[in-house]
Image (cartoon, rainbow, N blue to C red):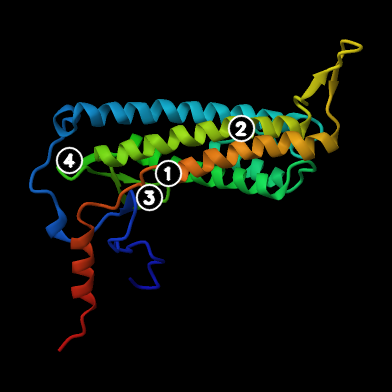
């Protein structure tokens, strides 16, 4: 790879997870091509692709819902999100992460859990987009091809193991988003929890001290448990020809004799 090309022609290393730059080795080309999705993929693969699509829609909707809380005057970003109605998912996540730097109730551990979940969502978005927009390439190996936003050729894994693992992660982050939803409600005063006064029969909201000592730590505890469960899920796989890629690279790096 030359410095002049800025890394645009960077070849895969054989260590890539789920997606990689399209390799140029002719030996990696499939021996047979199939353009019909129902012939190329199993029913299970097609079902997982559909499930990933729908699960991602649920995640995006929940991010929109959480983002609506920073419209409240307590948030310094309410005007920005109100003006720009065309913010994408990544832009909304960036704005929410920026807002975390201005919170007054959430502790550092809660913010860390939220940031970790958002980072996982951003990564999953890349994989989801690639899967939805990919073209059939090496169906026998479960490898599709697509062009990313920078117009660079990439490959994405669409094997049943890869698709199932991604769907599991999407399900997990959606569960985490539901707890994050509660934390943002509390932080923005969109929905402050409290208790019913048995004497007066009136609902009394918790003060900031009660929220910091008891309510937020309880939600954080659930969020941390969900985060731990996510990290124990099956990992996204490497490409099935990763060993061959590494072999090619080793030969190219061998000094001339």
Quadrant assignment, res 46: top left
Q: Nearer the viewer, mark 4 or mark 2?
A: 2
> Distance between the Cα atoms at labels 1 and 3?
14 Å
Residue at which label 2 appears: 179
Give the spatial CA distance, label 2 vs label 3.
Answer: 37 Å
Callout 4 secondary element = loop
Residue at horizontal 13 percent and vertical 30 percent from the top: 39
Q: Residue furthest bottom?
A: 257
Q: For mark 1, what is the residue?
A: 126
Nearest to the observer: residue 223 or residue 116 = 223
* Residue named by callout 3: 151
Q: Earlier in the sequence, mark 1 or mark 4?
A: 1
Q: CA distance from mark 1 to mark 4?
A: 21 Å
Query: Which numbered tag is attached to residue 70?
Result: none
Q: Is residue 79 visible?
A: no
Mark 1 burial class by Cα count in 10 Å: few <14, some 14-19, many 20+? few
Q: Secondary structure at mark 1?
A: helix
* Disc number lying in front (2 or 3): 2
Q: Which of the marked residues, 4 or 2, is nearer the chain's N terminus?
A: 4
Callout 3 secondary element = loop
């Amino acid at each position: 790879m030359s410095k002049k090309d800025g890394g645009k022609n960077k070849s895969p290393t054989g260590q890539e997870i789920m997606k990689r730059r399209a390799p140029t080795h002719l030996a990696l080309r499939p021996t047979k091509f199939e353009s019909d999705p129902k012939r190329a993929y199993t029913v299970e693969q097609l079902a997982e692709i559909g499930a990933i699509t729908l699960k991602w829609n649920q995640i995006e909707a929940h991010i929109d819902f959480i983002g609506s809380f920073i419209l409240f005057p307590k948030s310094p970003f309410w005007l920005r999100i109100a003006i720009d109605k065309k913010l994408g998912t990544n832009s909304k996540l960036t704005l929410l992460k920026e807002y975390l730097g201005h919170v007054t109730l959430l502790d550092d551990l809660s913010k860390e859990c939220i940031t970790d979940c958002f980072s996982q969502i951003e990564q999953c978005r890349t994989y989801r987009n690639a899967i939805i927009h990919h073209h059939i390439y090496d169906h026998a190996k479960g490898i599709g091809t697509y062009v990313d936003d920078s117009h660079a050729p990439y490959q994405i894994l669409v094997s049943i193991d890869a698709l199932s693992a991604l769907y599991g992660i999407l399900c997990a982050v959606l569960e985490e988003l539901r707890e994050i939803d509660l934390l943002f409600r509390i932080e923005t005063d969109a929905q402050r929890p409290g208790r019913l006064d048995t004497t007066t029969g009136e609902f009394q909201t918790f003060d900031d001290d009660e929220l910091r000592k008891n309510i937020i730590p309880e939600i954080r505890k659930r969020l941390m448990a969900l985060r731990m469960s996510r990290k124990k899920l099956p990992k996204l796989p490497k490409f099935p020809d990763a060993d061959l890629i590494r072999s090619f690279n080793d030969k190219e790096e061998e000094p001339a004799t």
